[in-house]
Image (tube, rainbow, N blue to C red):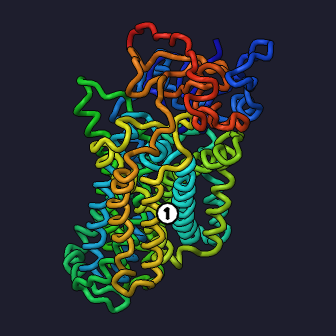
Amino acid sequence: MPTPAVTTGSYLPRPYPHPVGRDDRTLMTDTVTTPPPPGPARGAGGVAPSRTPPQLRETRRGREPRGLLAALRPALLPPLVPATVAGTALGGIAYLADFAIGASIVFTYGFGSGLASILTAATLIFLTGIPIARACATYGLDMDLITRGAGFGYFGSTLTSLIYASFTFIFFALEGSIMAQAMHQAVGLPVEIGYLVTTLIVIPIVFRGMGALAKVQAWTQPVWIVGMVLPFVVLAFEAPDAWGAFTSFGGTEGAGAGFSWIGFGLGTGVALSLIAQIGEQADYLRFMPAKTEANRRRWNLAVLAAGPGWVVIGAAKQLGGALLAFVALEAVGTTRALEPIAPQIEALKPWLGTFALPAAALFVIVSQIKINVTNAYSGSLSWSNFFSRVTHRHPGRVWYIFLNLAIALTLMEMNMFAALNKLLGFYSNVGIAWITAVAADLVINKRAGWSPPYIEFKRAYLYAVNPAGFGAMVIASVVSILAFFGLFGTHAQAFSTFIAAGLALVLCPLIAWATKGRYYLARPNTVNGPGAEVADERATHTCAVCETAYELPDVADCPVQAGPICSLCCSLDATCGDVCRKEPGGAGGPVLMPVPTVPRATSGA
């Protein structure tokens, strides 16, 4: 039997010691599949079953590093526990963009409007993140596959892959700019060269996959915690009146310290640009072990903390960053106060003196590496998923690292940091429409019975486009972007992100109700769908193409192959013509599936 294929991509089976576990994206194995048996066996409809696709064989020859085997093979390595997954996920929010975003909002719109903006955005992000985090952790799926099954369809979610990829390279560029500023301040390195250095430094880590990312997060966590807390401890002792003065701060553009509806709306739009961060949290949450009676409380707390809980820390960082920038404003000026490195140095000077510069630089660099390895990793997954569906080729996740980093480097060299508010405000309109539509499907449509009670992500069972989620997102995005550019007046411009959220929240259930949920499933899932008699989802089928065994949630019945096919081979098949979805009953009628292999009971499983 072939060596188990272990993955980092979208579908992640629960941790059982069987040769299972992979998705439509990324394989993490050095194995080469066993050659198929000789003979041109014919599938239903007279179509010859394809042999292992060349691009799939190349992926399996080791272009993906081994990593996180513990999540899939506890017989060999210790199983993950909820606290481990949560700790790793929270390590990915060490970024200092929160400092820059919070400072930018308060400097532009004043303390009153800025505080209301940050807290309102955090509330919306937290509420929409709860159902998404629980779905990712329950089904072992990443954000893209949740999107597919939550109202968008197989190709409908291709657009959201681009939206999410843009989130990763926009914030990689923002975080990289902050790191380059720190290097310039510490050693005089020109920022243009610093941009290149910050890009190249993450590549070796991201190449090694999620296992390396988890180690980086764990090893750097003590340094990050000390660096994060120390400036505020110094301020508490050396400038105890700073917070009082901060609450009266009217900004640097004459907005005033009081509340302004326009400032509140615009500031909330900037802060809501972080709503897609739940996608990066999902890349960790899918490794969560199965929920049981024994770990129920720990599981719920871990999912809440590592999922939407990131924004609690994020909002505190935004306010903290604004406070540090306010304290440093007189000493360094407005432009440098918006760069996190300068306020860090000014805050540490009373205690560390000349050592404040290297200490602050170390903290900034560690923080930015922690987040940018995640940005690069998640972006490579999104690009891989996008191109595998469009081109039916899967050269491996690592090749798309270069694409994602090249775009981010271009943004840095174009000095995107100078247009921070405008760029993030524009992105928010699309990001919140997407996330709100998915959350509406999970919370409303599934409970109302318009959406299937489970998440179906496999190509074999999905329509290309589902108008419920996809249509809601497109309409909400277009209307809110028009509002953002002032077509509907000043107030609509300020509240464009609220328009996006409101439309997506209403339209997704409305379209699902109007279509009676017709476009969720192109045909019933007879392998492990609600109507299938499944004694144990850990049972496996052997894929007719790659000849590797996978758990039932990752298998479809394929009339072309006249048997089981795994999700990746199904996605890469460019010759089947989607006959299983287009012809009533599939090509040639129902597929006769072999009896699945039920796993043997093992200790520690």
Looking at this rendering, what residue extends furthest in the front direction? 584
* Vertical placement of residue 440 versus 552, above or below: below
Residue drawn 62% across and 69% down?
411
Left or right of 58 in this view: 345 = left
The N terminus - image quarter: top right
Element type at marker 1?
Answer: helix
Mark 1: amino acid: Ala
* Vertical placement of residue 451 versus 253, above or below: above
Left or right of 123 in this view: 28 = right
Q: Position of residue 131 (x, y in %)?
A: 32, 46
State the residue position of label 1.
361
Q: Mark 1: few, some, or many residues within 10 Å (few <14, many ≥20)?
A: many
Residue drawn 36% across and 49% down?
441
Q: Position of residue 275 (x, y in %)?
A: 40, 59
Residue drawn 37% across and 85% down?
330
Residue drawn 38% across and 29% down?
289
Say which of 324 and 453 sits in front: 453
Q: Quadrant of residue 535?
A: top left
Q: Position of residue 454 (x, y in %)?
A: 38, 35
Q: Is residue 366 visible?
A: yes
Q: Position of residue 205 (x, y in %)?
A: 60, 44
The C terminus - image quarter: top left
Q: Is residue 211 visible?
A: no
Say which of 469 and 467 sits in front: 467
Looking at this rendering, what residue extends furthest in the bottom direction? 254
Say which of 73 and 59 sits in front: 59
Looking at this rendering, what residue extends furthest in the right direction? 39
* Vertical placement of residue 363 versus 605, above or below: below
Q: Quadrant of residue 476?
A: bottom left
